[in-house]
């Protein structure tokens, strides 16, 4: 039984990968036991595919966790895989700290853009989706996926490093080695899926290059540890904040009751800030002097690097192995990768589709990732410009309560409101308009409105996500009904679903709309 701390969730400070040997043969070998790799194993297992997962590491730790925010689109996949409730229950800080994303001068400072407090009379389900976004660190996802996979007899082996790949017409021979004992094994697989991060060994061994500009500066994601600060921040501080002051900027987000994520930078690529310098930024984000311990510092860049192909023969890439970019949603894009790839691998392995179906994975996901990456980089640049202008105009000290300071904070808040644009298109509009396997009627593709990061409309045309929402009084959603199957949607006003006498019309005389959906909800 997992230890249940005061948060009511699970203790996921350290996630231990199972100890064992990879099998000799498998349908798909997944290299990398991060959230994307384990999600891929979950997706493929649900389709009856024999998978195994190897990872060079033996553990994953909370204090080096990256992405924490998961969009409603990602939550749809959690729900489809049957793990959403487990993820919801795995709080790593008290749920009372979840008060939305606040824009503040510091944790104990002034709110720049008011956020409505949680209420029993909330707005209900989010637009376009059945479930809200949620925040959980990567280690939560890894532990939940590991538990789920263990229940389904899926082998995950920590401490095994991929060293060789040899492909032939029938499959791939993957040479792996135990990083501690040196024992070597060969795993024979029909396909190998690399989900082993930005420095992917799978990508290197497959000889796949990357394209995109290198960063000209770097930033750091810090984890700092506090003592008991409830006397200053209260028993339920806001867990998710974006800070704007002269020393700190960006996220100040709780990952546990004592550990917080703070951003630092930008810095020149060759600059190594001192620990004292980083801790001073952390204290500025909190807004008061406190004892802090620097637990970890991870470098990240505002730049885009995308593999030149997501498929080379029987080698496939997903997640950071395929694309890295400005932080903000990249884990979700990796989840989208494996959801797109899963049904295609299942169809090919079952003999229901030719191997060339897998070409559509690259045709669909790579342009989509490029589109989102370009938007994210431009958004980051606009944010940095706005921060520089706000700082140049002055940010009053938190202790300054004078009329001029109040007016200036209101000006800053108005600037932030004015600059804010929604991200519905980034979240939901995974259109695949360059795919060879999607058929359009004459002129249909040319008539589509262009992709916009801030706009999304449910669209029944090919290559778009199927709309989701509750479709019966008992709470079932359309995606619940589809699950991992294919579905034919017949949209009529007759609740029995019986065809009208003229099969081209519904009883109202309007043309019937029908669409074959793939299991990912497209």
Image (spheres, helix red, strand yellow):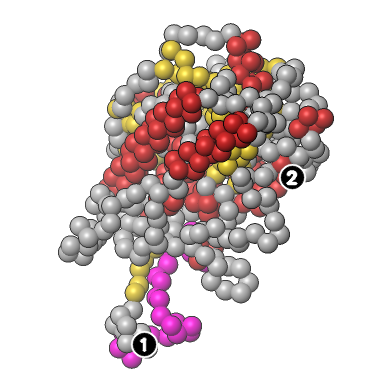
Q: Main secondary structure of the magenta part?
A: loop
Q: Which residues are magenta?
A: 481-503
Task: Determine whether 501 is above or below 443 in the image.
Answer: below
Q: Is residue 402 left or right of residue 439?
A: right
Instruction: Give the image quarter of residue 440.
Output: bottom left
Instruction: Give the image quarter of residue 285.
Output: top right
Q: Which mark is residue 508?
A: 1
Residue 501 in magenta stretch: yes
Query: Can residue 365 be seen by looking at this rendering?
Result: yes
**Of label 2 and label 1, which has the lower sequence position?**
2
**Toward the viewer: 139 or 299?**
299
Q: Is residue 283 left or right of residue 69?
A: right
Residue at image position (36%, 87%) is 508
**Residue 352 percent across, percent down from the top left:** 35, 57
Query: Label 2: how many residues lie within 10 Å, few (<14), some (14-19) or many (20+)?
Result: few
Residue 485 in magenta stretch: yes
**Residue 203 percent across, percent down from the top left:** 37, 27
Q: Quadrant of the N terminus?
A: top right
Residue at image position (71%, 22%) is 288
User: Which element is circle 2 on?
Assistant: helix
User: Which element is circle 1 on?
Assistant: loop
The span from disc 2 to disc 1 (Cα, nearest Å) is 50 Å
**Toward the viewer: 273 or 38?**
273
**Residue 431 percent across, percent down from the top left:** 34, 52
Instruction: Please give the residue where the numbered disc 2 appears in the rendered image.
Output: 96
């Amino acid at each position: 039984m997992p230890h249940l701390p005061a948060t009511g969730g699970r203790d996921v400070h350290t996630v231990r990968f199972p100890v064992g040997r990879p099998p000799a043969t498998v349908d798909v070998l997944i290299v990398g036991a991060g959230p994307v790799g384990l999600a891929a194993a979950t997706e493929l297992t649900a389709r009856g595919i024999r998978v195994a997962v190897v990872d060079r590491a033996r553990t994953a730790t909370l204090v080096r966790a990256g992405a924490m925010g998961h969009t409603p689109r990602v939550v749809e996949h959690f729900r489809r895989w049957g793990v959403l409730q487990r993820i919801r229950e795995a709080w790593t800080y008290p749920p009372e700290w979840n008060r939305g994303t606040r824009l503040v001068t510091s944790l104990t400072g002034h709110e720049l853009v008011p956020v409505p407090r949680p209420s029993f009379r909330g707005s209900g389900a989010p637009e376009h989706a059945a479930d809200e976004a949620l925040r959980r660190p990567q280690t939560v996802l890894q532990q939940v996926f590991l538990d789920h996979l263990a229940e389904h007899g899926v082998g995950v082996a920590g401490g095994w490093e991929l060293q060789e790949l040899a492909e032939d017409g029938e499959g791939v021979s993957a040479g792996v080695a135990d990083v501690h004992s040196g024992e070597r094994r060969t795993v024979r697989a029909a396909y190998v899926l690399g989900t082993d991060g930005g420095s992917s060994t799978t990508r290197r061994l497959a000889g796949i290059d990357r394209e995109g500009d290198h960063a000209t500066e770097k930033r750091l994601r810090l984890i700092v540890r506090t003592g008991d600060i409830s006397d200053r921040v209260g028993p339920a501080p806001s867990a998710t904040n974006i800070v704007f002051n002269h020393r700190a900027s960006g996220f100040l987000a709780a990952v546990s009751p004592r550990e917080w994520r703070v951003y630092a930078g930008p810095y020149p690529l060759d600059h190594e800030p001192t620990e004292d310098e980083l801790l001073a930024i952390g204290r500025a984000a909190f807004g008061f002097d406190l004892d802090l311990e620097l637990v970890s510092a991870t470098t990240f860049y505002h730049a885009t690097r995308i593999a030149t192909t997501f498929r080379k023969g029987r080698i496939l890439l997903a997640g950071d192995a395929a694309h890295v970019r400005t932080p903000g949603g990249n884990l979700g894009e990796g989840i989208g990768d494996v959801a797109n790839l899963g049904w295609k691998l299942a169809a090919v392995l079952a003999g229901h589709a030719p191997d060339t179906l897998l070409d559509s994975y690259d045709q669909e996901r790579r342009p989509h990732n490029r589109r989102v990456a370009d938007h994210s980089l431009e958004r980051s640049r606009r944010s940095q410009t706005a921060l520089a202008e706000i700082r140049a105009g002055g940010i009053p000290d938190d202790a300054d309560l004078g009329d001029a300071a109040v007016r200036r904070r209101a000006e800053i808040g108005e600037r932030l409101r004015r600059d804010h644009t929604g991200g519905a298109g980034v979240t939901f509009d995974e259109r695949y308009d360059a795919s060879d396997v999607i058929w359009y009627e004459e002129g249909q593709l040319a008539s589509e409105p262009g992709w916009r990061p801030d706009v999304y409309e449910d669209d029944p045309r090919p290559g778009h996500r199927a709309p989701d929402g509750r479709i019966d009084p008992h709470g079932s959603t359309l995606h619940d009904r589809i699950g991992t199957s294919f579905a034919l949607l017949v949209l009529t006003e007759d609740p029995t679903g019986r065809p009208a006498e003229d099969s081209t019309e519904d009883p109202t005389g309007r043309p019937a709309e029908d669409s074959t959906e793939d299991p990912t909800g497209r």
